[in-house]
């Protein structure tokens, strides 16, 4: 056996290319903790009803810059939640962060969740879309076996000191009529749900809500508190199931509510004559979307009981809170009913320019900010008049990422306006109406009229006529309006000097030139083979013409001629292929002749076992000869 020796020039080129790469890896490759090691997207349910929700969760290992929600037109986002945990792997501490988005379908069928984008260290990674089956009339899911049905929901009832015997200081409302801050956890301002039936010494879960009769669109705070008996040993929580809210927009604010505590501990509390260690399980800000009775679902914790002399020692038990009913009030008649403008806001209206030419555009900026859910706010705008034409606005919603109180943010809208003619005219005042839930009444903000002056006419722009359709000739010449609040981070400058990039690139260029020369030599060597492919058709014709229909094994010779022709002309080996696989392989190569080629080979294979008369063999040979000539004529 002859051993093949490697070209020494190739070995030297590889060594030369490896030196700068190793130096680059040692000096400039970021540490593993600088980016997320793994990204996983999942959903909690694969089949839901058209009136139910599904949770789309993105889980990352390691810190990331930000995560954008899934971009699906089949679902709307009605809530968000975020959680962080720390685990130990291979002797290192790994921070795991999860972003949850509660999605509600817009129609039934096989719907896609879309992709979420994860930004980490200047890189962007997109998750894969997940298909959700949405069925009408609430879905077809069943209650899993072994799980007790949820208890009947009740209405929250005020209790002294929030049900605890140790008073919790209430949150003091501002004296200037401002927005009352969030009440403290388990304070007298929070209304408890009560507790389910239990034995003395068992842990409890109590749900608290800040308001029992909110308005549609008003923010409501919900706390779930876990009570562990002080002198209870051998009980430990193993898992927790978060509530699934239906009919609410919601956001998880547990980390904000637990700020200043150690492992979410609220201290020791006395409840019904027994001492408990109180822990905050979850906190949410809810926004009811519909009026009437709306149910806040229960939260469930699995507790493993290993107390001595306890029946069913070592079994896990499910501890649940009691569901609560909120009596959501409909908004009174007003100028913006059904828009979601609920909260307390301010408005700022600013034109891009006060002077332009007829036919040009003036971008009008409308910024609404304050306390409320920005994604539900609908900003107003001017209407068409004899002087201006209004086009589609670009709206951007920005929610404050780390709230310390009620959800705040801003809605920025940029509206392109076309000036129709020369002169001086006014943009009418813009009015924005919203419902203030703390005052229980509608309020309207109004801007001042804006005077715009048009001097001359832009000859490159055609002014749109007074029709319902805007002329596209001037729109194509305009730059796209830039959003007021861009959530994309500024581009990062590379910290790697240019000389290092050149050092890394140069060996690979030399290596590519060396391989290029080798490839060119191989291509010249294969020229003879290409010329032999051109003669394959003539050889196949001569072989087919020499076959006698009455000879033994004539059908096999026809199949051999056709197979050799395909191998020499198209590098296709037909041996071992099924008829369907052969037909699928031939279609891209032969087009319309693929079916005839597969049929000839198939009939030859059948004739080998079933036999065929001389006339049939002759017809088969003539068809094969005509096929080769047609293929050669089209090449």
Image: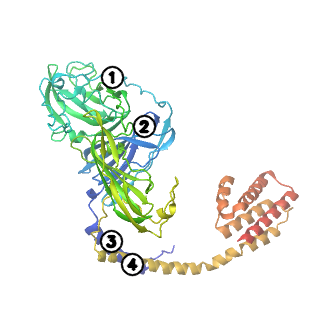
Query: Disc 3 vs disc 1: which is toward the camera?
Result: 1
Q: Is residue 11 visible?
A: no
| Quarter-of-image position of residue 169 | top left
* Residue under numbered circle 3: 21
User: Residue 420 versus residue 37: which sits nearer the camera?
Assistant: 420
Position of 300 with respect to 361 (left or right) is left
* Residue under numbered circle 2: 45
C-alpha separation, residue under disc 3 versus residue under disc 1: 65 Å
Check the image and report above or below for 337 versus 61: above
Badge 4 or badge 3: first in the primary sequence: 4
Query: Disc 2 vs disc 1: which is toward the camera?
Result: 1
C-alpha separation, residue under disc 4 versus residue under disc 3: 13 Å
State the SS at label 2. loop
* Residue under numbered circle 1: 153
- The spot of residue 570 in percent (x, y) is 65, 68
Position of 317 with respect to 584 (left or right) is left
User: Which residue is pictured at 39% across the width and 51% down the height?
Assistant: 382
| Quarter-of-image position of residue 419 | bottom left
Neighbor class of circle 3 (other Cα within 10 Å; few <14, some 14-19, many 20+) is some
- How did the renderer colour the structure? rainbow
Query: Disc 3 vs disc 2: which is toward the camera?
Result: 2
C-alpha separation, residue under disc 3 versus residue under disc 2: 46 Å
Residue contact between numbered discs 2 and 1, judged by CB atoms under 8 Å? no
Badge 3 or badge 1: first in the primary sequence: 3
State the SS at label 3. helix
């Amino acid at each position: 056996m002859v051993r093949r020796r490697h070209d020494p020039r190739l070995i030297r080129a590889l060594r030369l290319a490896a030196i700068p790469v190793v130096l680059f890896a040692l000096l400039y490759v970021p540490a593993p903790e600088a980016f997320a090691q793994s990204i996983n997207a999942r959903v909690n349910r694969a089949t839901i009803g058209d009136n139910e929700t599904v949770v789309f969760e993105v889980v990352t290992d390691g810190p990331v810059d930000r995560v954008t929600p899934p971009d699906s037109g089949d679902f709307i986002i009605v809530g968000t939640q975020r959680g962080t945990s720390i685990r130990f792997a291979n002797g290192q501490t790994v921070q795991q962060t999860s972003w949850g988005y509660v999605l509600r379908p817009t129609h039934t069928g096989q719907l896609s969740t879309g992709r979420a984008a994860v930004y980490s260290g200047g890189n962007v990674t997109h998750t894969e879309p997940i298909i959700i089956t949405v069925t009408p009339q609430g879905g077809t899911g069943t209650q899993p076996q072994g799980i007790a049905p949820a208890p009947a929901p009740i209405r929250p009832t005020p209790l002294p000191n929030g049900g605890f015997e140790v008073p919790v200081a209430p949150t003091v409302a501002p004296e200037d009529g401002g927005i009352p801050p969030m009440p403290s956890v388990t304070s007298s301002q929070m209304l408890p749900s009560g507790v389910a039936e239990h034995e003395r010494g068992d842990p409890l879960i109590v749900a608290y809500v800040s308001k029992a009769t909110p308005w549609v669109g008003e923010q409501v705070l919900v706390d779930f508190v876990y009570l562990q008996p002080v002198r209870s040993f051998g009980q430990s929580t193993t898992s927790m199931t978060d509530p699934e809210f239906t009919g609410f927009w919601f956001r998880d604010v547990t980390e904000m509510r637990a700020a200043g505590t150690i492992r979410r501990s609220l201290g020791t509390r006395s409840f019904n004559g027994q001492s408990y260690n109180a822990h905050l399980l979850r906190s949410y800000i809810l926004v009811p979307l519909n009026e009437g009775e709306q149910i806040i679902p229960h939260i469930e914790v699995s507790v493993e009981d290993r107390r001595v002399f306890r029946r069913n020692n070592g079994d896990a038990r499910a501890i649940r809170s009691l569901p609560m009913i909120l009596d959501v009030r409909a908004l009174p008649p007003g100028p913006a009913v059904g828009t979601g403008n609920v909260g307390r806001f301010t408005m700022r209206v600013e034109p891009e320019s006060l002077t332009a030419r007829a036919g040009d555009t003036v971008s009008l900026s409308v910024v609404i900010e304050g306390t409320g859910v920005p994604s539900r706010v609908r900003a107003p705008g001017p209407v068409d008049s004899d002087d201006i034409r209004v086009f589609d606005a670009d709206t951007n919603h920005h929610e404050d990422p780390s709230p310390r109180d009620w959800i705040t943010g801003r809605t920025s809208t940029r509206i392109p306006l076309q000036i129709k003619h020369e002169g001086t005219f006014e943009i009418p005042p813009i009015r924005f109406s919203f419902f203030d839930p703390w005052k229980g009444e509608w309020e309207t903000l109004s801007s001042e009229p804006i005077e715009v002056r048009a001097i001359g006419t832009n000859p490159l722009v055609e002014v749109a006529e007074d029709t319902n359709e805007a002329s596209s000739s001037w729109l194509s010449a305009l730059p796209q309006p830039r959003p007021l609040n861009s959530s994309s981070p500024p581009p990062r400058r590379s910290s790697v000097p240019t000389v290092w990039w050149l050092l890394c690139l140069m060996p690979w260029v030399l290596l590519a030139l060396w391989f290029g020369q080798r490839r060119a030599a191989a291509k010249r060597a294969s020229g003879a083979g290409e010329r032999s492919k051109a003669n394959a058709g003539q050889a196949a014709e001569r072989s087919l013409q020499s076959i006698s229909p009455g000879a033994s094994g004539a059908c096999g010779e026809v199949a051999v001629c056709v197979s050799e022709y395909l191998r020499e002309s198209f590098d296709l080996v037909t041996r071992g292929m099924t008829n369907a696989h052969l037909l699928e392989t031939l279609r891209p190569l032969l087009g319309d002749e693929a079916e005839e080629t597969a049929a000839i080979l198939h009939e030859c294979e059948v004739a080998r076992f079933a036999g065929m008369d001389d006339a049939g063999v002759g017809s088969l040979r003539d068809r094969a000869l005509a096929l080769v000539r047609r293929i050669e004529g089209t090449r």
